[in-house]
Amino acid sequence: MPKAYVFTRYGGPETEALIEVDRPRPGPGEVLVAVRAAGVNPVDWKQRTGFRRPGEDGEQTFPAVLGNEVAGVVEETGEGVTGFAPGDEVFGTAVAGGYAEYALLAAGITAHKPAGLSFTDAAALPVAAATAYDGVRQLGLPAGATLLITGAGGGVGVAATQIARAEDLRVIGVASESKKDSVEALGAVHVPSGPGWAERARAAAPDGVDAVYDLVGGEVLTEAADLLTDRARLVTAGATEDAVRALGGARVVRARTAAVLDAVADLVVRGELDPLVTRTYPLEQAGAALREVENGHAHGKVVIEVGADA
């Protein structure tokens, strides 16, 4: 039987386990994929604690497979699926977990993997890079504008920085001191996070910032809002809709389309976006991969490699 890394109830890491599961069967509009790589994101451990993404209805059933980003090879297609066939190399967001040997993807938001893109890099794109792309596009800044990104050292921040630089934006990246070199290597001006970061940002951008892409939320979001004269240029993926609306900003509007996946994959192939996968783990060590992200120690992107040719 195929293996999957699951959580057996809501809680902490003690609820996780690598178990044998039945091979999933694709329903209407779904494709079954033999997983080659699965991206690791903060939302993965948050779901283990009971967090539900907007639009997720119904009770969670257990055991539940962890993970949301998948790249692999199509094994089978469900009723009504067109444009995909067994053997196709694809990537997308998992319907019900991706840390597994097999996963289901919704065909409508699954993209073909370009030949020049590895499975490992492709698995880093559906959540982190696509969220980054949606946020930068939502702000719609002209070339030469200054964009401040909080949480610039994480998976979404790394991608957002590069996408913004590819659109000729000046980027101020707020991240921990330990991530200074990686943030600057992406072409951003690094501002150390922590107490007093907003004043340091003002010093780094004496003419002000034109927009903020927040990936942290909380007090950082509030302080970031104060850097703007036009709060409509405040977008967050790190706070609730109510929290950011109270400050005059908005949540990132996720497109969740295959077209966005095609766009970010094209950026990688053209050399304008490096998913910056800095650590990989086998499926048997999925717990260690998730701990690295959950503890905030990841520099860039962590990916679980399932197939030998990831």
Image (cartoon, grey):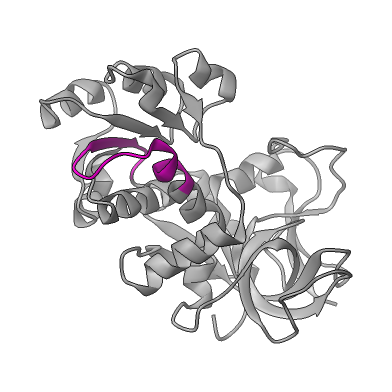
Q: Nearer the viewer, residue 269 or 123?
A: 269
Q: Quadrant of the C terminus?
A: bottom right
Give me the residue at 58% from left, 18% from top. 242
Give how far across and how far down residue 196 sits, in percent.
Answer: 23, 21
Answer with the quarter of the image where residue 52 lies. Answer: top right
Q: Nearer the viewer, residue 308 or 107?
A: 107
Which residue extends farthest top? Answer: 246
Give me the residue at 63% from left, 48% from top. 44
Q: Quadrant of the N terminus?
A: bottom right
The answer to whether 217 is drawn above or below residue 262 in the figure is above
Side of 56 relative to 249 (left or right):
right
Give me the residue at 87% from left, 38% from top. 59
| Residue 137 is one of the magenta-drawn residues | yes
Side of 85 relative to 142 (left or right):
right
Give how far across and how far down residue 270 sits, in percent.
Answer: 34, 72
Q: Nearer the viewer, residue 256 or 7?
A: 256
Give how far across and how far down residue 285 sits, in percent.
Answer: 60, 66
Side of 177 relative to 96 (left or right):
left
Q: Is residue 36 visible?
A: no
Answer with the quarter of the image where residue 216 lies. Answer: top left
Q: Is residue 119 visible?
A: yes
Q: Which residues are magenta?
A: 134-152
The answer to whether 237 is drawn above or below residue 18 in the figure is above
Give how far across and how far down residue 74 sits, in percent.
Answer: 72, 79
| Residue 44 is one of the magenta-drawn residues | no
The answer to whether 33 is drawn above or below residue 231 in the figure is below
